[in-house]
Image: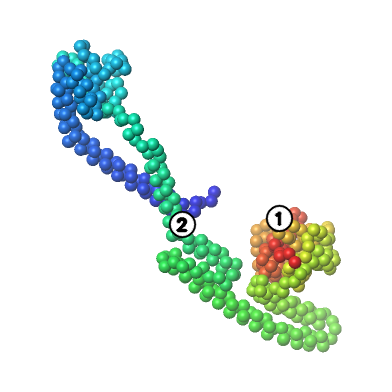
Amino acid sequence: MAPLPIRWRLVGLFLALALASTAVFLGGLQRAAVAGWQTWAQPLLGDYVDRLAAEIGSPPDPARAAALQARLPLRVRIDGPVVRFGADRRPRAADRNADRGDDGDPHGDTPFALVRRTADGHRITFGLAAPPAGWRPRGSGWLPLIVLLAGTGAAYALVRRWLAPLDLIGAGAERYGRGEFDRPIAAARDDELGRLARRIDAMAASLHGMLQAQRTQLLAISHELRSPLTRARLNAELLPDGAPKDAVIRDLTEMRDLVGDLLEGERLAAGASALAPETVDLRALAAEAAAAAGATPEVDASIGPVRADPARLRLLLRNLSANARRHAADAPRPPVLFLRRAGGALELGLRDFGPGVPPDALPRLAEPFYRPDGARTRTSGGVGLGLHLCRRVAQAHGGALQIRNAAPGLEVAMRWAPQAA
């Protein structure tokens, strides 16, 4: 289960602190109220109730009790052997409950009650009168909830505004991870998050400069190597025919291909700017590549022309075919070169029927110079740049290279959403 966003956790923390503060405040207020009640209010109230009972008299006078009820917000109830007042709605207390002393209303018909007994055996209960109808405005019970929800919404909006640079920083980090350094984060804030965004932009600019310097150096070295390799190849052609000459020419050819792949990989690292897009008939291109590779074509006839770089697509299919020939030469059937729809995208790739690769090696297959096991060594051909170039081609077209074991065999496909021609 994914964790809650930090903004919601902060709002929850604020609410928890508010509730805790309220509980502590109410607890302290209750202790203070209890202490004040027991020390000051209870004696004063008890004395006042004694005076009210004395005003009613002994035996109690119902007229005086009625006058008290009319003058004060009280309810008076008298139970006794001679006088009964205000007890016509409920049975006597002795019939339902034992004597509860001088505090509390045994009948429970008043929210707060005090009891006094007269010398002639009457019981006088004083309680607060019920509030008049309509004294509390309608909907007042919902008002605290509405205020709480409004406060929570305001707190969330404020926290979201405070943490807005985090979204920009996250999106910027993803762009930098993909090698896209053209657009900085540029969070226009002067707080800690704004300063963090500027530090990340500075770090990305420094990394971009180092990568550019390394790429420039690699391109220069590769260009410089091509000339002596060409001269060495010409000199090797002058050697007498035989095994030594063939070995020298084979090694020089491998070195030439390696330099060419390195140059092409660095060019494609620039992304879409390295492409020369034009209108491409993908069905014809796939059929041509399948015939050249001796593969079985599986082409969706409904796919029309698109905008792409045909030279780089041919490079991708040549590398996939060479990889299949190298590692699935003994497969029981030829590879399948496919062009198909996958949701709103297209997939162009090849599946062989060889042994496949270990599952833990799949994520690294497109890394440069990576070979997953002893069978994939230089002696079997290749230096580990073919799938790396395929990934570069896919990324330059705005897509991705997908590699999976097809049981049997290995399936490699470029998946992208091209622009229709």
- Is disc 1 in contact with disc 2, using a CB cutoff of under 8 Å? no
Question: Could you say where residue 222 lies in the image, as x and y percent from the top left?
Answer: 67, 81
Point out the image quarter for the C terminus: bottom right
Q: How is the image coloured?
A: rainbow
Circle 2 sits in a helix, a strand or a loop, which is it?
Answer: helix
Which residue matches tag 2? 160
Identified at 16% across, 15% down, the residue is: 59
- The crowding category of the residue bearing disc 2, from other C-alpha atoms within 10 Å (few below 14, some 14 to 19, many at least 20), is some
Location of mark 1 (residue): 343
Q: Nearer the viewer, residue 352 or 59?
A: 59
Which of pointers 1 and 2 lies earlier in the amino acid sequence? 2
348 or 51: which is nearer to us?
A: 51
Q: Quadrant of residue 342?
A: bottom right
Question: Percent position (x, y) of residue 138?
Answer: 38, 36
Residue in the image at 26% along x and 41% along y: 29
**Which tag is nearer the camera, tag 1 or tag 2?**
2
Name which quarter of the figure residue 130 lies in. top left
